[in-house]
Image (tube, helix red, strand yellow):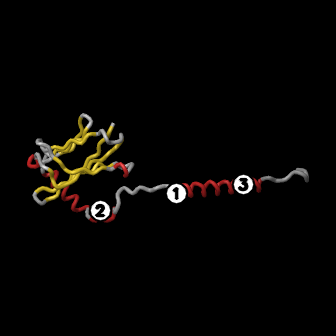
Amino acid sequence: MTSTSKNRWPLGIVLVIALFLVVMLSVAGYLMTQDVNLVTEKYYEKELGYQARITAMERARALGPDVAIGTAAGAVIVQYPRSMASMTGDGHVVLYRPSARSSDRSLPVVADSAARQVIPFAPLASGLWRIQVQWTMRGEEYYMEQPFMVP
């Protein structure tokens, strides 16, 4: 080494550390500006009432195979108990989109003469959805839930 050549290692180390800090601060700043969608609002209160939902699910299962959720020909079909034929029940159907809370939809329970409700896929975006059906019959609550795919 001659007296005119300089050791550039310290400068390189300082530049790498400075570049690393700039990148990390940029990523942290970007992530802090992103909107965070919670799965549901008031999730703590919903969690406290979860035992009631489990009981409602068991009641719906006890009704047997006549009560079910299925998909066919571009629609979700909810089959209610025969006693609910041609009536508007006290309840609601929620079409829940896990990836985009703003796409969720809520509908009233409306059974046709065959005690079923047909919900078309047409207004729904393609992807994974979850249907949650809750209704009250003779003073008791019932609940069913099932995922489905919209093509």
In 3D space, how far apart are the residues under numbered discs 3 and 1 (Cα atoms)?
Answer: 27 Å
Q: Amino acid at mark 3?
A: Leu
Instruction: Name the residue carrying label 1.
Output: 33
Judged left or right of residue 57, residue 96 is right
Residue 54 visible in image: yes
Q: Is residue 31 left or right of residue 90?
A: right
Q: Residue at x 27, y 36 (%)?
A: 74
Residue 142 in view here = no
Q: Is residue 134 left or right of residue 36?
A: left
Measured as percent of width and height from the top left, residue 124 is found at 32, 42
x, y (%) of residue 73? 24, 34
**Number of callouts in the render?**
3
Is residue 125 or residue 99 the one in the foreground? 125
Q: Position of residue 128 (x, y in %)?
A: 34, 43
* Residue 15 - label: 3
Read off the residue under disc 2: 46
* Number of other residues with Cα within 10 Å of mark 3, as a class: few under 14, some 14 to 19, many 20 or more: few
Amino acid type at circle 1 is Thr
Name the residue furthest left: 83
* Separation (CA) of disc 1 from disc 2: 28 Å
Residue 26: x and y, percent?
A: 60, 55
Query: Does residue 48 sit above or below 92 in this rendering?
Result: below
Residue at 15% across / 56% down in the picture?
136
- Point out the frontmost of discs 3 and 2: 2
